[in-house]
Every structure is written in structure tokens, then in C-alpha cells.
Amino acid sequence: MRLKNGCKNLDYGLIISVLILFIIGMISIFTATNVEGLAGTGAEIYIIKQGISFIIGCVIVFFLIRSDYNLFADHWKWIYGISLLVLLIVFIPGVGTTNMGTTGWINLGFFEVQTSEIAKMGFILSFAKILELRYDRLDCAEDLIVPAAFIFPPTILMILQPDFGQALVILVIALGMLFVAGFNIRYFYGLFLFSFIAIPTAWFFALDYQKARILSFFHPEADPLGTGYHAIQSKITIGSGELFGRGLATQGTMTKLDFLPAQWTDFIFSVISETAGFIGAALVILLFVFFMWRLLRGARLAQDMYGTLVIFGVFFMFLFQITENIGMTIGLLPITGITLPFISYGGSSLIINMIAVGFVLNIYRRRLDVRI
């Protein structure tokens, strides 16, 4: 009876939306990897690894749902410390591995763990406690010293990897949670002013490849075979899908010819747009809108401020990742290594996204203080 009552109080709308997004992702990954360029590897290995990651995520979610999220609030210091530790471990020679210029992974042999993914969830759980203790007491500059000091270490460690995309995710999460916790709106104006000064200044400290990536965002045609290649190929791929798409099995497409690099990870939305067209891409976006609405609903129904802040942290994490990934594929935002939640290939990303949903389900279920 207790298990039945626990299942009854879950947010099945949220669960169903995640399942549909995952299924769309598996189909898209198979389409993106079933190309001549990967003939020696085979699409099956990507599907198997993604499936295993999903199963691991489901097992973790099952135990999260049956736990009390306040236990994580009580141990927020340990969670924050572990989050910083996993970010530091990659700098130990022989431990951290480098992918796409970023030293942010730990190779476990059978699985590579992206440490910034773990740190994001740890940051949300611990920062929510910091803000709960200071709720509606963030009106003056002195009140922001502790939150600012809390944000600084993980952001800097991600920048040093360097993983600017994930560092930006942390900043967006932090600002969103601060706003919910009663952060005085006038400080946002100050942050915007600071950004206008800091961003041009940061240009002088940026590495050459980072400058090239920024320049290619404004004018990708200047280097069509170099820094602008991804942006150009992505827009061509999306445009070729037209209204109804070219189908999953059609030969001679941009996807099948493997013109688009990382099309099963960062540019999976381009694959969806080509195979399912504008209609299919729009449906995926609407599904994400429904998913985000369920998160907001869960935040509104949470029984305490800690639960509300955790869900809002998850909300802003997903909001930025979805917006940035889709925006970069259509040329509206700079290209970063941000994946599309539940759809892009990536074990660490999928598991952490599942864990984030697990916490939301836990908080939603506990709104009635159901004990099991």
C-alpha cells in the first residue's frame, strides 16, 4: 500500500515527457551514427552505451524517489566539497583525460565520467541550502559575499579545464536561484553593466581558438572549412529538412553523408530537423516546453523553500542547456559543448539529467509528506 501511494503521487507528466525525449534521442543517435564514416564502429555500440546509461539513471532515480531530499540539505557541505574534489581530480596527471581540448573527464575504463556534470548537480543541492538560510535577506552587497564566494570556486575550476560552456551553466543556475531567493533586482542591472565591461576585457585574455570561435559566430563564412564549418553545416542540415523532413532511411542526406561533425552529440537537433523537418523539430521544442512547465509546477507545489530552490536550480540548468544547444545549431548563439538534454549521446550527461529529474520527482512527491 505504501509503495502504491508513493507511485500515485509521482509527476507522471514529467516522467512521460522524459521517456519520449529519450526515445527520440535513441532514434536520432541511431540515425546520426548509422553512416559510412562509422562503418567500422557501428551504431549499435552508441545505442547500447546510451541504453546502459539510461538504465543506470533509472535505478538511481528509483532510490532517489524513495529517499528524503532533506538528507541532502543536511549534508550540503559534504556535497559541495565532493563537487569541488571531482573538478580538481582531473588536473592530476594520469587521471584526467582530454576530449575536444577540455580536460574534464575521468576514464574508468568502461565509462568516461564528465566531472562538470557531477559538479552541476552538487552545486544545485548545496547552493539551495545556502540561499534557504538567507531567503529574503539578499538586499545589500554584504549579503552577497557568501553566495558569491560559493559560486566562484566551481566556476573557476571549470574555466581552467577549460570548459566555458559548463562554467556558464553554473553562472546561469546561480543567478536564477538568487533571483528566486529574493536577490535585489537592482544588482542584476549592476551585473549587466559589469558584463559589458568584463566581456570586452576578457577578449585580451582569451586563447586563439576561443577568439576564432567567437569570430566565427558573427561571420562563419570567413573560414568555411575551419572555425565556421560546424555552424555552416548545421544550418544547411536543418534547412534541408524543409517542412516534413527527409525521413530516417533516406540516402544522400547531410546526416547520412556525415558532413556534420559531432552530429550525435552537440548537433543532434540538426539531425532531427533534417529527418523530421520543421514539424518534427517544432514538436521536440513543444515537448521541452511541456517538460519545463512540469518543473515550474513542481517548484510551486514544493513543501519548503529548499525544495523550491532545488527545482528552480534544475529548471535553469535545463533552460540554459536547451536554449544554448538549439540556438547554436540554428546560428543564433555561439557554439559550445552543451548537449541537448535526454537526446544527445553522452552517458554522464544523461545520468545527471536523470538524477536531476529524480530530485524533482522526490520533492514533488514529498509535497504531501508521504512516508514509505
Image (cartoon, rainbow, N blue to C red):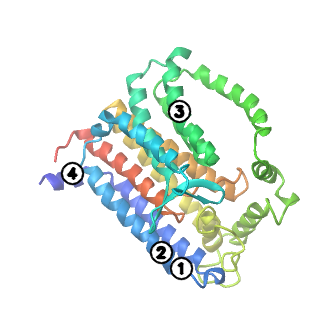
| Residue kind at label 3, given as amino acid type | Ile
Residue 266, quarter of picture = bottom right
Q: Residue furthest left?
A: 1
Is mark 2 in CB contact (under 8 Å) with mark 1?
A: yes
Q: Earlier in the sequence, mark 3 or mark 2?
A: 2
Mark 3 or 2: in front is 3
Report whether residue 172 is seen.
Answer: no
Measure the alpha-carbon separation of dots 1 and 3: 39 Å
Q: Which residue is mark 3?
A: 151
SS assignment at label 1: helix
Query: Upstream in the sequence, badge 1 or badge 3?
Result: 1
Nearer to me, 97 or 228? 97
Question: Disc 1 marks which residue?
Answer: 43
Q: Which mark is residue 6?
A: 4
Residue nearest the viewer, comparing 55 with 242? 55
- Amino acid under disc 2: Ile
Secondary element at tag 3: helix
Whether 9 is drawn above or below 267: the answer is above
Using residue 84 as the reference point, say whether residue 67 is left or right of it: left
Judging by the rendered image, the residue that carries numbered circle 2 is 47
The answer to which of marks 1 and 4 sits earlier in the sequence is: 4
